[in-house]
Image (cartoon, helix red, strand yellow):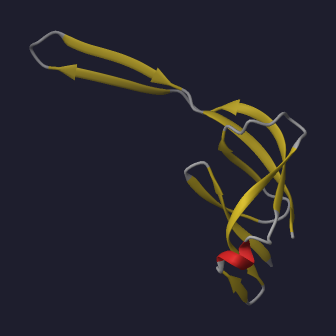
Amino acid sequence: MVYAIVKSGGRQEKVSVGDIVVMDRQSAEAGSTIELTALLLVDGDTVTTDAEALAKVKVTAEVVRDEKGPKIDILKYKNKTGYRKRQGHRQKLTRVKVTGIA
């Protein structure tokens, strides 16, 4: 089984061919192809972590769609002072399908 650990944004994901991964928003249109940076490659019994060898590895993925993550509510409250603050956040994400590891 061939799989790779790739870096996307500030996170790392374990991917193999055919996997669908949700990562931080990428600046690519739906249907386009992007290339991900490999940090580790496992091909059967062979594990590759050498930076020079990984520079030759290409992990390609097709952008499926852009989406938003779940709503996160941020509430701050201080007792007896009348201080209340409410804030919300939805992370922008991109769903990609891994098409090849070469």
Position of residue 6 relative to residue 91, above or below, is below
> Farthest residue toward the bottom?
45
Total marks in image? 0
| Residue 65 x/y as whole percent | 80, 35
Position of residue 53 relative to residue 76, above or below, is below
Position of residue 65 relative to residue 44, above or below, is above
| Residue 48 x/y as whole percent | 69, 82
Occupied quadrant, residue 51: bottom right
Tell me what residue is drawn at x 84 percent, y 57 percent.
Answer: 60
Position of residue 2 relative to residue 26, above or below, is below
> Farthest residue toward the front?
52
**Quarter placement of the N terminus:** bottom right
| Residue 11 x/y as whole percent | 57, 54
Q: Residue 35 versus residue 43: which sits nearer the camera?
A: 35
Occupied quadrant, residue 28: top right
Tell me what residue is drawn at x 12 percent, y 19 percent.
Answer: 79
Occupied quadrant, residue 5: bottom right
| Residue 33 x/y as whole percent | 87, 47
Position of residue 63 in the picture relative to residue 25 (left or right): right
**Quarter placement of the C terminus:** bottom right
Position of residue 30 in the picture relative to residue 85 (left or right): right
Tell me what residue is drawn at x 72 percent, y 73 percent.
Answer: 54
Tell me what residue is drawn at x 20 percent, y 13 percent.
Answer: 83
Q: Residue 47 versus residue 75: which sits nearer the camera?
A: 47
> Farthest residue toward the left?
80
Position of residue 15 in the picture relative to residue 100 (left or right): left
Position of residue 13 in the picture relative to residue 43 (left or right): left
